[in-house]
Image (cartoon, grey):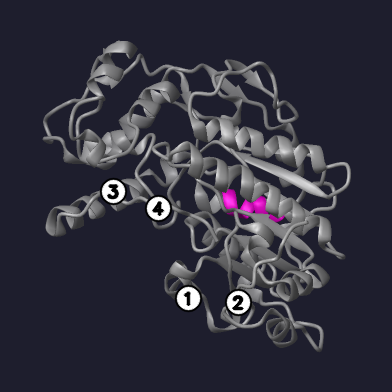
Amino acid sequence: MRRRQERRAVRPVEELLRRLRPHAPRPSCSSDRLESRNALVTDDVVFITGFPSLLARAVCAEIVRSDPGARLFALTQSKAVEEARGCIDALTAEQRKRVQLIEGDAAAIDLGLSGVEFKSLSREVTRIHHCAQVTYLSADRDTAERVNVGGAREAIELAASCEKLDCLVFHSTVHVAGDRRGVVLEEELNAGQSFRSVIEETKGRAEKLMRSAMDRIPIAVVRPSTVVGDSRTGEVERFDGPYLFFLLVVTSPPDFALPLPGRGDEPLNLVPIDWVARAAAAIGRDRRAPGRTFHLVDSQPLAARRVFELVARAGGRRAARGSIPTNLAKALLRAPGLDRIVRSPRALVETLTTPVTYDARNADELLASLGVATCPPLETYVDKLVEYVQEHTRQRRAIKKPAIEVEDPLG
C-alpha cells in the first residue's frame, strides 16, 4: 500500500481551492486574447509540476495569458519556494491571483503531498502539465530514473485519481528516438533504436509508461525538438547542446573563424521555449489531443552550418570555415576545462551528425485548426539568443561563476 507523506503545502490546498474557485463568470481580458479560434475562457484547474523550471514557468505564463478563467497550482520543492514566489511576482496582478504554489516533490510518493492535499486536488484538477524532468546530459542515472521515470509514474497516479480530468500533458522530447535516422513518426516509440544517453533512455521509458496508461487516462504526449531560449528575451535555463557553439562563437576573437564539427549539412531542428509552451497549452486544452503524440518541431529546419552562420553574424564574428571530422571533434571536445563552461559537449556532435527528420502531421493539423502559428524561423530570434549568451558571458567574467545549470528541476 502506498503511504501518503505528510507534507505541508505553501498554503493548505483546501483553502487555496476555496480562494480560487470562481463565484461568477469571468470576463475575458482583451489584452490576453488568443489568436483567432484559440481564444477562450474556461474554468480549468491546471496542475503544473516542475515549477519554477523554465519550461514550467513558460507553460504557466502561457496558460494564464491565454485563458483568463484558468486557475493554476504549481508544484515546487521546498528549497525552491522563494525562487518560485519571485517568478509568480513577475506576472500581472490579475494573473498572480490565479496561481498558487504547493510545496511537494514530483518524484516522491503522491508528489510529496499529504493525503488531504492529494484528495483535494483529485476532486478539482481538470488538466495536468507534467513538466518536471531532468534533461541535462551530465545527470547521473539514479537522478534521471528517479525524476524522469518515477516522476512520470506519480503523475499518472494523480491523473488516475482525478474526477474531472480532461487531459494529462506529458512533456517528452523527440530525442526518445535515440540514434534513429530517417523519418520518425509521432506514433512511433519503440523502433529498435539505441539510446545515446541516460536522458534519452529514461525519457523513453517514461513515455512508455504514459502510452501504457492511455487506454484508461486521457493523456497527450508533446515532443519538442532541441529547445533553445525564449524568442523574445533569449532566456535559457542552461547552456547545453548547441549552446556550446554559441559560447565558443561569442568568446572567440572577432577575426577567428571556427571550424564546424562535422560537415554541417544535416538539419538542426531548434524550437524556442515560448513557442513550445504556447503549442503545448493549446494541445492540452483540445479534446482531440488525448491518446496522441505531437512533435513540436520547426517544419523547415536549417542545416547546422546555416544555424552557425546566423549565430556568428549575430555575435559579430566570422562564419565557420571548414570542418573537423566527427571523431576528431569528439576527441577535441574532451579537452580539460571545457566542461566547466558547458556540460557534455560531445552531445552536440551527435546532434549535428545524425540525419533525422521528425514528421509532425498530428501537431501541424491540430495547431493550425486552433490558430496557433507555426514555429518561428530562427532568423527572427537568433539575435535574442546570442545577446543572452553574451550578457551571461560578461557577467560570468565579472563574478567568476560557472555556467547556468539547474541540477534538480523538480517540483
Residue beneath label 3, please? 389
Disc with the residue nearer the chain's start (2 vs 4): 2
On the image, numbered disc 4 is attached to which residue? 406
What kind of element bears circle 1?
Answer: helix
Numbered tag placed on residue 242 in the rendering:
none
Measure the alpha-carbon separation of dots 2 and 1.
13 Å
Callout 2, which amino acid?
Ala
Q: Quadrant of the N terminus?
A: bottom right
Mark 3 or 4: in front is 4
> How far separated are the C-alphas under marks 3 and 4?
16 Å
Q: Mark 3: give few (<14), some (14-19) or many (20+) Cα within 10 Å.
A: many
Horizontal and vertical percent for residue 130?
64, 54
Of label 2 and label 3, which has the lower sequence position? 2
Q: Is residue 371 visible?
A: no
Report the residue at 19% width, 57% height from top.
Answer: 395
Question: Residue 278: within the magenta?
Answer: yes
- Between the C-alphas of marks 2 and 3, the distance is 36 Å
User: Rounded to the nearest whole Å, what is the CA distance between mark 2 and mark 4?
Assistant: 23 Å
Name the amino acid type tagged 1: Arg
Vertical order, 231 against 201 (above or below): below
Vertical relation: 408 (above or below) 64: above
Looking at the image, tell me whether mark 2 or mark 1 is earlier in sequence order: 2
**Residue at numbered disc 1:** 85
Between 70 and 121, the one lying in front of the other is: 121
Secondary structure at numbered mark 4: loop
Residue numbers of the magenta segment: 276-283
Q: Which mark is residue 9?
A: 2
